[in-house]
Image (cartoon, rainbow, N blue to C red):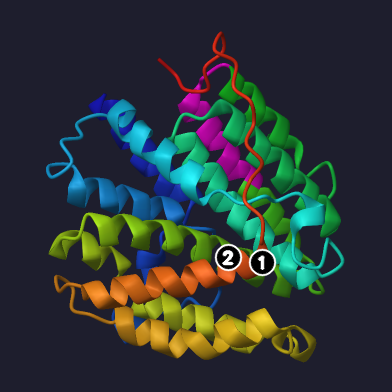
Amino acid sequence: MLLKLLQTTACCSILFAASAFAQDAPKDRQKFTDLPQISVIDKLLAIESALSVKKHRASEDEWSRDYESLYQRFQRNGQISQIAGEGKNDVMNALALGIKASDAVLALKGRDVEGLNLASEQIQQIALKLGASKGELGMADTVKRYADSKRWFDAFMALGFLQRNVLTYLKENPEKKPQAVLVIVGGWLQGGRCVADVIEKEYTVDASNVLREPRFVDLLKKNVDELPPEMLKDPVVRDIQKDLPEIRKRVAVGFHDPVKIEDVKWLHKTFDGYILRILPKPEPKAEKSAAEPSKAP
């Protein structure tokens, strides 16, 4: 189990570049100007570390029940017709793709086969809408195959490669690169929404510090500010850009200091509001067969 945890943690660091890379580096050493990949996983691992004693969680299987509950409460319907703009607005499509990427991680951590398969399908549909080809999306079927076999570590790896391939496609096409920024923003909003909710309900100093990421927010704002003018005119993007300085102020705490409970609540409410503007309707509930439970035994 320890070896598996170390493998998973290493995999997380490789595939989901943690936002911490920019938070504490000395200013004269900080060379990064591009955003990392979607990084909800580093926050989830930090939450597990901060709350494992309080919640009496000692194994991944025990945490899976918490993640399944979190996924069921916060999942969003990523069908093209349910995205704001009904698939005709690439700004909303890119933000929705990021949201579904975070949903997929939650479903995987929750050992939810049907949820992960549905999220993978919707990631594929939205990415195709943004112009990705079958080549960039080949891992979607691999994710579903591993999930069906309950090979969770392999599914995690495949999901990481799927997200990397889609973001690489967007970043390497100059006209698509701004969409990559919005995908990361969407994933950050959904991840922050879920993590802030957990911290609000299980508040401790250590857990609240998980939300500390002022330099990542600086990097996010820099990239959002550089979006094309037509994207910055979008009401959701415009409001996100306007809120980023306030978000930074609330998460700019000392290395071991708490994010105040009232700030945690504000962050959750703010993130929640954006998610509901991008994907207004909740995920359709898939019927689960009693003979084929969605979670691993």
- Type of amino acid at the residue the image marks with label 1: Ile
Q: Write the residue at 80% across / 68% down.
A: 90
Q: Which residue is mark 2?
A: 275
Residues at circles 1 and 2 in contact by the CB criterion of under 8 Å? yes
Who's the residue at 19% across and 52% down the image?
A: 50
Q: Main secondary structure of the magenta part?
A: helix
Q: In the image, 203: left or right of 143?
A: left
Which percent across, then down, holds residue 88? 87, 66
Q: Residue at x 35, y 63 (%)?
A: 196
Q: Is residue 23 in sight in this rendering?
A: no
Using the image as rendered, state which of residue 240 and residue 262 is in the foreground.
262
Residue that appears at 61% across and 89% down: 225
Q: Is residue 61 left or right of residue 39?
A: left
Q: Position of residue 143 (x, y in %)?
A: 63, 31
Q: Quadrant of residue 237?
A: bottom right
Q: Residue furthest top?
A: 291
Residue 83 visible in the picture: yes
What stretch of residues is rendered in magenta?
149-162
Amino acid, disc 2 = Ile
Disc number placed over residue 278 in the picture, else none: 1
Q: Secondary structure at mark 2?
A: helix
